[in-house]
Image (cartoon, coloured by chain):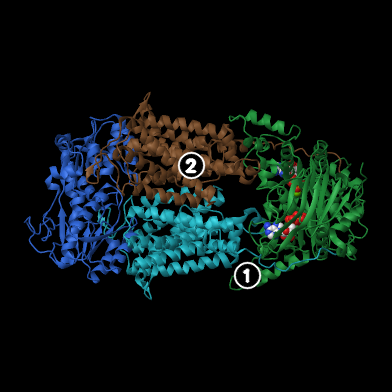
Chain colours: A green, B blue, C brown, D cyan
Amino acid sequence: MTFAVTSVSKVYGATRALSSVTLELRPGEIVGLIGTNGAGKSTLIKILSGATAPTSGTLSYEGRPLEFGGPLDAQAAGVQTVHQNIDDGVVFGASVAENLTLDSLAAGGAWFLTRARVRAAATAVAPDLGLPLDVPVESLSASARQQLLIARALARRARLLILDEPTSTLSEVEADALAARVREAVAQGVSVLYVSHRLAEIETLCDRVAVLRDGELAATFTAPLSRESIVAAMLGPVAASGYVPAASSQDGVRDPEGAQPPQSAGPVPDVLVAEGVRAVAGRKAFGLRVRAGEVLGVTGLVGAGKTELLEQLGGARPLLSGRLELDGAPYRPKDPRAAIDSGVAFAPEERAAQSIVPGWSVRAHVTLPWLRRHSLRSGLLGRRSETDAARRVIELFGVRGPGDDAPIEALSGGNQQKVVVGRWLAGEPRLLVLDEPFRGVDVAARADIGRVVRERAKQAAVIVATSDPQELRGLADRVLVMHEGTAAGELSIAEATPERLAALMSGTSTEPPSTEPPSTEPPTTLPEDQQHGEPA
Amino acid sequence: APATSAPSPAASSAPTSASAAPSAPVPAKFAGGNVRISLVRQLSSGDYFEQWLAGAQAEAKALNVRLEVSSGDGNNDKQALNLEQAVTAKSDAIIVDHGFAQTVQPAVKKAVAAKIPLVAFDVDPGAPEAVALSQDDHAIAEQALGALKADTGGSGEVVYVYVAGFAPLDRRNETWEQFKKDNPGIKQVAQIGVVNSSTASAVADQAKAALQANPGAKAIFAPYDEFAKGAALAVKELGLAGKVKIYGADVSTADIGVMTEPDSPWVATSATDPANVGRVAVRAAALLVAGESVDRALTVPPSLITQKGLRDAGITSVEQLTRAFPGLTTPDVARVPWTAS
Amino acid sequence: MTATTSTTGRAAPPARTAGSRAAAVAYRYGLLGVLAAMLVLFSFLRPAFATYPNALVVLQSVAVVGIVALGVTVSMTTGGFDLSAGACVGAVVMVTALTMVRFNLTGATAVVAGLLTGLLVAAVNVLLTVVAKVPDLVATLGTLFLFQGLALIVTGGQSVAPGMTVDGAPAPGRYTEGFAWLGGGTIASVPVPVVVFALLAAAVYVLLNHTRWGRALYAIGGNPEAARLAGIRVARYRALAYAVSGVCAAVAGILLSARLGRGDVGAGDPYLLQSVAAALIGFAVLGANRPNALGTVVGALFIGVMINGLTMLNAPYYAQTFVQGALLVGALVTSYTLRRIR
Amino acid sequence: MTATTSTTGRAAPPARTAGSRAAAVAYRYGLLGVLAAMLVLFSFLRPAFATYPNALVVLQSVAVVGIVALGVTVSMTTGGFDLSAGACVGAVVMVTALTMVRFNLTGATAVVAGLLTGLLVAAVNVLLTVVAKVPDLVATLGTLFLFQGLALIVTGGQSVAPGMTVDGAPAPGRYTEGFAWLGGGTIASVPVPVVVFALLAAAVYVLLNHTRWGRALYAIGGNPEAARLAGIRVARYRALAYAVSGVCAAVAGILLSARLGRGDVGAGDPYLLQSVAAALIGFAVLGANRPNALGTVVGALFIGVMINGLTMLNAPYYAQTFVQGALLVGALVTSYTLRRIR
Ligand SMILES: Nc1ncnc2c1ncn2[C@@H]1O[C@H](COP(=O)(O)OP(=O)(O)OP(=O)(O)O)[C@@H](O)[C@H]1O
Ligand SMILES: Nc1ncnc2c1ncn2[C@@H]1O[C@H](COP(=O)(O)OP(=O)(O)OP(=O)(O)O)[C@@H](O)[C@H]1O
Ligand SMILES: [Mg+2]
Ligand SMILES: [Mg+2]
């Protein structure tokens, strides 16, 4: 009943993505797979799921060797995989019920289908999913789509369930629900291979942890797990010595060594002032302001309206209400170009759908927003200046991969993320708006991005949205918490204890009156020293 | 598609000689089989063009000439380029089969400049050195309309099928306009027409609509065989056989089949034999290569073919038709003295 | 670690204003509305339009195009595109004519030969797109040329008509009565092509909307990789789609051949553009926004009614193309603009 | 806070086996190889083929199609598809002819009128696709009918030739010498259309491969949402693409009109399929796998050389279509099959 990976190596051109990895996956066990970006996690998963063949080494089940000609062979052998890029798994244009029953189309059975039959079959696949069955799947949020995929994989009676960063788009609550589901499956004797960059999750969920480093199996740990040793194994001896893992602080967002909120000597001017804005039409209006050199974190559950808010600031969607001011001047971008030209850089949330142009090189991705700057006087593009810009981003963020000329798909997920976030820093923006910049990024790289962002924040204002408030540790000066499409409150980093955050995020807090202004003329958020209000 | 060209010199036909036996020795060039004649066509698909080509090829074989065929396939620029290429390749003679005067004339000039003899069928070559061969479209329309007038007594509602822009149709249209003036009893109640690669079935659909809208129509004047076939299909499908008669133009084996079907509404067509025209074109070109004199304007006259005539003689193909109507073969137009005909 | 209460439920669907409801209705029924308006207008201007015989005329003029369009629709469901449909019609016309006229075989043999030709076209398409992985548009463009050429070659570029000369002698056969009935006959006063069109439309509708295979076809069109990972044999279904398209084109070719009574070179050519137009117009019917059988039928009717009505109104032929274009554009703009408002 | 060690240098080109190297080479150069082989074969069989005058004839026969195809290529870069290109050529031919023949204006006016017509077609396409958000294929299909119809209407369905009858009197004007020179003239013995084609090909190549506008166009084709969020004004660039396509079609129409010497109804019709074929064949050139200027030029040459060579070999016209199809299919299968092996 055991899946075994024996001496598996994988070479992509000059890159050794995996070298001689050996791992056993036993029934009823959850094995965490972690490693820095580009360590080879996705590669190992692709091999296990039959998407690519190993360069050398073997797979076996109960001692019998497995040869996967393709993903279907792997599925037939009981290996079910939910890939990192969820949109690869759903069929747009079809309803949720149809997506849930996709497997039954191939399985045979009744050839005449009615809507009722499809609904019934869908309910059988996922009795307690709680998603509307008849809406088209593209109207679901990313997390709902992911839940759909996981439900499907579980329904397929997996022997080995592989989840590649399943929680990167999920909120904590949803992640907990997922964890319960995974435990259920494990109780029935399924093996689970679980990839995540969230160490807390790994710690609570996994029985064993395999750490990959530079394509090698650096170590395996058995529960009870210690974060320090895991991180040390992940980062390796050289890096670990100089690195204070942010994850080691256990107490919410506050980080003793991280953020030093700028000790404003004189009055620092506001870069962005927003008044009377709304994240979702019909919800309460609110305001916010960010100063130069300041990082404002925006957090809230999935669907709280963070993305809507940030997209309005970045010109990606029209402003619903209120007014914006940038450096004292009115600011109302009609599209992202206008925002960029005003000095606002907006890195959107969904990498594959919103940032990646398939087949393009890293270099072309870096320069896409700044093409005019890379044009020579003749109107032609300057290859030199493009290459330089790309190499700067690669260097600044420690992007690991085959270089600036390679297609971006040859980079690991986290490294792709560094490129598409990092390119926005090339423009020296006044305001940097980042939506979920740490999705799929390992702890070390997160620290890298955080460091660069903080450095930037010396001249510019930064807004970072994330549904995981821990990611704001060491980065944000203030935290704006959103709930159901409006601001639930604002905390200075010092006040942002887990309890208060939880209360605000879930809407159980008695709102601080100051952030709930009487409707007509909403003042902007108060300075930190006036913030008060105790969570329930 | 219909035959197309600019107006050709309206000179009457004049046979070059009148005897039947070979009256001259075969020129050396022809005996050696080294004569290359380029046939540059505007179009090549369709019965008319196929039969035309078959006739031309048969004549070329008889004369021991190599016929190099190219077609513009409806793209007139391509036809002009093919013509230029024939000049570049130094053919012994060139036959231009249809086309637009303005488009082919620049290339014709090049041929003349290169001293390559040229025969132009149904297109004005615009150069006095070239021979212009044409079929008499006005006569074709007159013959068909004569039959129409005789059958209707010169009055009644008529559906007319016409598409402008195709020279032979335009010429036939001139006759129709004149005919309407001369016969005020004839009333044109609808004008329809489509030309594409499936002309017959498209015209059938239109004719059905027109006949539904005009139940009083007695006759359809369709001076192009694809039009006539479409109209016949429409009449048949509406069950109006006996009520509506069709007067057409051109003829092919398939047309004969449609005309002689039981209850066929297509009662008369006026036509030249396309194969014969193809033969005449090759003969004229061969004469030019041999340095013989040829009239600068040759015309092939049409004959009226009636349903009754076809049925009475039991004719089912163009071959039988030409035997039964010797007028369709015109051996005296551009007779080649060194062959028997 | 932080939040505890769950708020994962989606927000309730936004309440709609009466205006946006109307827009949504117009989007769903826009094209049908324009079609209905045309019918009323034409009937009003020309009473002869709104008669049963004329309805049959319209339907018959639509039948062949509609059948080809149904096949094209199926090929589109998987994200493919069958540019070779018109060429297939043409090839089938030639093959059926040759079978009866030149080889003097029965009408039934001709039907079988025609269907086999359709499957042959489909097989070439499948080889190119599924096996050799050539993109659909280019591959079927190649097939188009190939079969257009083949139809010409088998007859030496000539039309095939009874009595034609083959190697000096007249061809022995002719169109059989039974075969001709397929084009000109009626069943309970309805022309056979219309009956065939109706049956095929129903079959394709059921296939696409109510069978596993239809679902699988749409799934492949939506996300081929996801479909493959769900165990759907993508290659087989894409082959199925092309086979259906080929068979539909073959049926259309057989009916056309029967109607023409001869094998006409180039007879199939106009059917590509018209059938693609019908299928594409169909996207906008009932808000489907994807290839669908019902929409295709409506699209074909739309074109047929338009041409018939305009001809009855005695509109000159050269104005018809323009009016067709204007109506098409109008219908599309209405549909897609309203869709956005919704 | 230190980080992972960075390995930013470019990776060495991956070591390949000889076999896969060969396949990769064949994939990149496959179509060029077939083209070269055709050239050698035709020259061998027909010495007249490999002459300078004949090369000019081939190039000239390719020029008009090639120019249309360049425009279609640009429209394809953004993921669009300009089905109206052929109709635009036809409309421009009519408009230029009318300007000179009917309104007795100068050749320069005719050129301007032609270009404006091209921009008008582009404007309609932009209104439909960018403003009304109608999908490209259907929208440009509508435009196709619209302008095909318009070209017929302005002349009452007649061709426009010098000396034609207008309202009972002969038309006053004729093609000017200067205008005719555009079609029949030469520059240093090279025909004007060939020169124009070469210049436009170079311009489109530079535009697409070496300017920020080209980069933006490809970005939109690759992922429109990512392009928008990266600050590219998608609507403007899509309009630009259609404008370039319209202008290319207009230039082609002007040259064609000058070559024809008259406004020919339906003159533009054959150019749609051929230009699309050239652009699509171009996808496979040099392994680009996307619309590209160089590939389109090669695609147009491929078709031109093939047709010319076959005509010179005296292949019957009905065999040419088939051979064309077979060669096209062969080239595509080679290219795409080898691509997979790579
Ligand atoms: N298709 C490919 N071509 C070339 N190199 C590749 C390809 N796919 C992955 N690699 C390389 O293999 C290495 C391992 O990548 P992999 O995707 O397995 O990392 P990962 O551990 O999943 O990282 P992440 O946490 O960022 O997703 C990386 O250096 C990456 O650049
Ligand atoms: N695809 C969708 N269709 C309809 N409503 C949606 C969709 N996605 C989100 N919403 C709704 O929009 C509101 C805000 O969503 P938004 O994506 O901005 O939240 P978020 O806080 O950014 O969460 P996430 O972490 O998922 O980005 C919620 O009310 C949610 O229900
Ligand atoms: Mg990964
Ligand atoms: Mg979000």
Ligand 2 within 8 Å of disc 2? The answer is: no
At label 2, counting other C-alpha atoms closer than 10 Å, the crowd grade (few under 14, some 14-19, many 20 or more) is many
| Amino acid type of the residue that numbered disc 1 sits on in the rendered structure | Ser
Q: Position of residue C308 (x, y in %)?
A: 38, 37
Query: In the rendered image, which residue does mark 2 sit on?
Result: C72
Residue C59 against residue A231 in the figure, above or below: above
- Furthest toward the left, the residue is B19
Tell me which residue sits at (40%, 51%) in the image.
Answer: D148
Q: Quadrant of the N terminus of chain C?
A: top right
Mark 1, other Cα within 10 Å: few <14 / some 14–19 / many ≥20: some
Tell me the residue that label 1 is attached to: A375
- Residue sitting at x 57%, y 66%: D209
What chain does mark 1 sit on? A
Please report, as a chain letter, where disc 2 is located.
Answer: C
Please state which amino acid type lies under the numbered disc 2: Val
Image spot of residue A311 (x, y percent): 72, 52
Extreme-bottom residue of the structure = D188
Q: Does C174 appear above or below A82?
A: above
- Foreground pick, D194 / A260: D194
The quarter of the picture where the C terminus of chain C appears is top right
Secondary structure under badge 1?
A: loop
Q: Name the secondary structure under disc 2.
A: helix
Question: In the image, is C160 to the left or to the right of B29?
Answer: right
